[in-house]
Amino acid sequence: MNRRDFLRTLGLTSAGALLAGCERPSKLISKIVPTDDNVLPGEALLVRTTCTECPAACGMIAKVRDGHPVKLEGNPDHPFNRGALCARGQASLSRLYLPNRLRTPLMKAADGKFVPVEWETAIARINAELTGNRKHLFLSSRTSGALAEIVDRFCDKRSVERLPEYELYSHSATRKANEIVFGRPVVPAYNVKDADLLISVGADLVETFLNPVQFAQDLVANEHLRWIHLEPHFSLTGNFADERWTIRPGSEAYLLAFLAGELNVTAEQAERETGVKVAGLVAALKKAKAPLLIVGGVSNDLLSAVLAALIQAKYNMPIDLANGLDFRRVGSLNDLARSEAKLAGAGVLFVYNADPTAYRPSFVAAMGKASFRVGLGDTLTETMQACDIVLPLSHSLESWDEQETAGVRGVVQPAIKPLHGTRSAGDILLALAGETRSYQQYLDARWGEETKRLVETGFTLIDKETRPPVVQTAAVEKFLATAALKPVAKERVMVVVPSLRTFDGRSDVLPVLSEIPDTLAAISFGEFVMVAPDLGANDNDVVRIEAAGLRLELPARVQPALPAGVMVVQQPFLRGTAVPVTDIGEVQTVLPVQSVSVTQKKGNLPILSGSMNAAGRGIQPEHDHEHPPSPNDGLRRAGAHEKGHAAATLYKPHEHKPYRWAMAIDLDRCTGCAACVAACYVENNIALVGPDEHAAGREMSWIRLEPFTREDGKLDLIPMMCQQCDAAPCEAVCPVYATYHNPEGLNAQVYNRCVGTRYCANNCPYKVRRFNWIDHPLENPQQLMLNPDVSKRPKGVMEKCTFCVQRITTAKDKAKDAGRLVRDGEIVPACAQTCPAQAIVFGNILDKGSKVYAQSQDKRAYRALEELGTQPAVYYLKAK
Amino acid sequence: MMPALNKKLLYVVFTGWCVTAAVVAVAVGVHHRNRQARLEQPIHFSHNIHVVKAGLACAHCHTTADKSPRAGVPALSVCMECHNKVKTDSPEIKILTEHWNKKEPVEWNKIHEVPWHVRFTHKRHIAAGVDCAVCHGEVKTMTQVHQVRSLEMGWCVQCHRQNNAPTDCWTCHK
C-alpha cells in the first residue's frame, strides 16, 4: 500500500483502539420488589445443600453473592462433616462454572459430529426410539433416595431394564462379605469415636475411604485411641496413623485368618507370610476394651473382607450395618462386564452420570452394538462422545434433589438458576416417563411436612435402628470350606490407589485440583509413579513398567517410606486402559510387576517440595521421644525470654491495639489432606497458572503443605503460609511501601501500589510470597466464581496470605455495629474453616482467653525459623 | 540540505501531527460523549422534585445505605407505591410503569464509582455521622445526578485524617 493509505489506516486503527478502551458506564440494576431473604447487598445468602462430588454426601452451605455462589463451606450442623469440607468439596464449586460444560442438548448428525438441538427435538427423538421390542437398558452411577425412585419409575414405564449401577470403587468385597457373614449386603458405618484401639488394614481413612472428613474429625477427637494402620505401600493415612506397620502386599488374608482363628493359620505362618509382628496385634486386641477393625481400600479381596467381618463379630465391634453409605444398587466391575455383553442387540442405551469407558475401553465398542445411545452428563467424556444424543445436566447447585445415605436425608437445593440450557436428571426422567410434574414438585410431595425443615437446615436424620449383627454360621462355613489363601507375591508389585485430589478420576475436570500438589509426592500436574529407593531411580527418571497386562511409562518420584519392591500409581493415571479386575469384581489393587526398568528419558514433573530434607533448620523440631522438650532445644514458648539471647533490634516494638491476629496450627492433627489449600484458592481468587508455570516453580498457592522426610521415612507435613511477622524482612525492602505492618499485626500487601520489584519475595525466609508473572485471564463463566470481597491481582503484582483479611474486616464491622470488640471464634479464615481435623486456630493473641493464646502457650508450641528474629505470628504445635 | 528531503520530512511530520491530533480529538470527543452518556439515565429521575418538592428523605428510597456496604437504588415497587396514582400521564412515569408491568429491572447508570481494588462501605460512614451531601453534594437540588467530589484516594484520606478514621491501607484496599 502507499504511504497515504498506510497513514490513514494507522489513524483509524488508533482511533478505534482508543474508542475500545473507553469504558462504558457500569450499571446499578434495580430490583422489581425488595427481596424477602433478609440478605443485604454485599452480604451472602446462605443456601444449605449437599455436596455431590463423591458418594460421601457431606452437608454444605453455598455462599451466594449477587445471585451466584462464590464459596462452599461445610454445614456446621451436619452429622457427617460438621462444618468441614475436603479439597474436592471445596473445588466442586468450579464444576458449576466449567467453561466446557455441556450447555444444550446435542444430537449426532449423519457425519458423526454433534449439533445443538432443542430439548423438545431431543426428547421427541428419544421417545421415538423407545418403541419397538428390543431391550432398552439404563446404566447410571450411584443413585439414592428420590432419584433412584424416579429412575425406577422411568424404567418401569418405558420398559427399560435397569442395569446395576457403576462405581469404580463399589465396595463389592465388603458388601459380599457382610452378606455372607451377617446376611446383609451393605457398606457398614464405623464408629471410630469411641474406640480405644483401631486396626485399619489398607483403608485410606483420611483420604478417600467412605467419608474421609468424618474419619479425620472423629480420629482427632478421640484422645484415647491407639491407631495401628497396616498397609502394603505408603499412604497419607499411614503417615497420619499413630503406628504404621508394613504388611506384605496381598497377604492380608493370612493375618486376618490368624486373628479370626480360621483356616488353621498359625501365628508363625501369619508372621512369615505378612512380615507383621502378629504378637503385638494380639496383645493389643487383648488389652483393648473397645477395639475396631476396618479393612478396605487397597485390601479389597473377598476372603479378607469375610475374615474381617468375623473378627468384628468376635470382638463385638461397633459395626453399624443399617447406617452405612447406600450402595445397594451398585454393581461390581463384573456386573459392568455383564452389562456390556447385554449391549449386543439392545435397543436404547441410557448412560446417566457415568463414564465406564474411562477404565474399560471396550465399553465404547459395545455401545456401538446398541441401536441408539442417550447420554446424560455435564461434560463430553469419552462415553458421552459415543452417544447419539447427549442431554446436558444441571449441576447440583442448580437443581433440586436429595441424597439419602448413611442415616441422613440431605437436601440438594439450588443456589443459582441454571447458567445454561441444562435440566436436572429428575426432570428429564419424569418427562420421559410421561409425567407432567417437575422433580421439585415430586420432592415436595415426597418430603411432605419435612420440607420446611429440610430447606432450612439442609438435612434430616433417618437413622435406622441398629440391631447387633448376627453371624450366619452356615453361610460362613460354606464359604470358608472352599476358601483358599493365595500365595503371596514375592516379586515387585505395583499398588493402584485412589487419588487424594480426584478420587477415582471423576474430579480431574476441576482445574483447581490439578494446581494443588498431591501431598505425599508434592507433584501437581502430571502423572507419575511413586517408587521405593531400591529401584535405583532418581526423581523424574522415566520408568517403564509391565504389570498385569498394562504397559506404562511414567516418570518416577522416589518415596523413602515405600517398602522395597513396591511402586504406587494413582488410579486416574490409568485412565484409558482396561483396569485389571479381581474375581469378585473389584479393582485389582496389587498388580504383580513382570518387568520394570529405569530408562534414560526424563520426565518434566513439577516437584514443588524443594528439598525434602529439613537439614536441622528448625522448620519442624526433631522428633525425640526419649528426651522431652526443654527450654534449650529450640522449642520456645511465646513470651519466654532466652537468657542472653534477647534479640537486639533497631526498631521500636510494634504497638497492637486492640487486636494482634495470630494463628496456631497443631501439626499433630494435620492429616495433609490439602483441604485448606483448596479453600484458600476459592476464597481468595487465586490464579490457576497451568503446568508450564508450575514447572518453573511459579505456583500461586498462598498456603502449601511442605513435606520433609524424617529418619523413619515418614513425612513431616507443615502447612506454610505468610507468617505475618512482627519483624518482617519483606517490609523493610519494598521501595514503594506496598507492604507494611498494619496496626493489627498483619503484614499488609497493597496490590495497587506494588510495582513488582520482587525484592520482598527475595527477602522472605519462608518463601510464601507469590508473584503474578503473567496475566491469568478467566474463561467465561469462571469470572462468576470470583469472591467480590477480594480483588483479582493483575500481572506484575505480589500477593500472599492475608489471614483472610476480608473475613476479619467483616467481623470487625459486625462487632462495631454491636458496639463491642470481636470475640474469639468469630473470625475463621478459609483454611481453618474447612480443615476436617480442626488443626488451624485463629484469633487475637492479645486476648488471654482466646484459643490461639492458649495454644501458643502449649509446651509443644514453637515458631518456624524463629532464630532469624522474624517474630512470626504463626505458632506450630509440634507433632507428638 | 537537499530541498527534496526537507519537503518530504515536513510532509511526513505534518501528516503525523494531523493524524495524532485527529486521533486525540476523536478520543476526547468520545470520552465526553461517554461522560454525557453516563449522566443520561433511562428514566429522567429528578431528585429535586422528589426531595425538595415532595419531601422524601434519602433513606426512604436508599433504604440499605445505613445497613449495608452498598446504598443501592430502590426496587421498582417503592416507586410504584406513589406512581401507580401520581402523575401517571408523565412520559417518564409511563416508562417506569412499563418496566413495572413487564417486570423488567431499570438499569441506572452508576454515577459514583470506586475502582475495583477499593472496598467502600456506606454503612460505616453513615454510622460515623457523615451526611450524604458531604460526598454526593446537594443531590436534593439536582435534576440529574452528577458527581461533584473527586472520589480520589487523596480526598478520602484527607477526611479520614481530619476525623480520626482509620488510615490503614487494608481498611479500603481489598
Image (cartoon, rainbow, N blue to C red):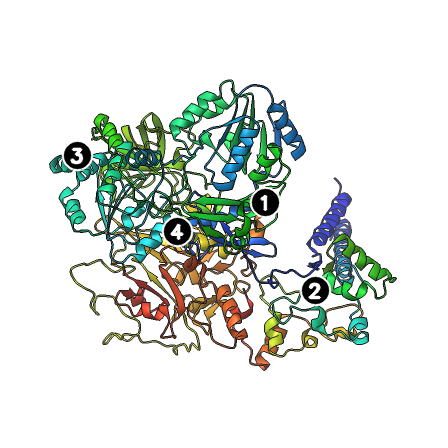
Is A279 located above or below residue A644 in the figure? Answer: above
- At numbered mark 3, what does the secondary structure look like: helix, strand or loop? helix
Mark 3 residue type: Glu
The answer to whether residue A53 of the structure is visible from this angle is no
Count every numbered label the image shows and give the total. 4
Residue A587 badge: none
* Vertical order, B41 against A571 (above or below): below
> Callout 1 environment at 10 Å: few (<14), some (14 to 19), or many (20+)?
some
Which chain letter goes with mark 1? Answer: A
Circle 3 marks a residue in which chain? A
Q: Earlier in the sequence, mark 3 or mark 1?
A: 3
Read off the residue under disc 1.
A440
Q: Which mark is residue B73?
A: 2
Taking the spot 75% from the left edge, 68% from the top edge, the residue there is: B146
Which residue is nearer to you in this view: A389 or A528?
A389
- CB contact under 8 Å: marks 4 and 1: no
Question: Which class describes the residues within 10 Å of circle 2: few (<14), some (14-19), or many (20+)?
Answer: some
The image shows residue A94 at horizontal and vertical percentages of: 52, 47
CA separation in Å, label 3 and label 2: 76 Å
| Residue A776 as seen in the image, left or right of residue A831 | right
Which kind of residue does numbered mark 2 sit on?
Answer: Val
- Marks 3 and 1 sit apart, C-alpha to C-alpha, by 56 Å
Q: Within 10 Å of the Cα at label 4, are there few (<14), some (14-19), or many (20+) other Cα atoms?
A: many
Occupied quadrant, residue A871? bottom left
Q: Secondary structure at mark 1?
A: helix
Q: Residue B65, can we see it?
A: yes
**Chain identity of mark 4:** A
Specify the quadrant that holds the N terminus of chain A.
top right
Residue A358 position (above or below residue A440): above
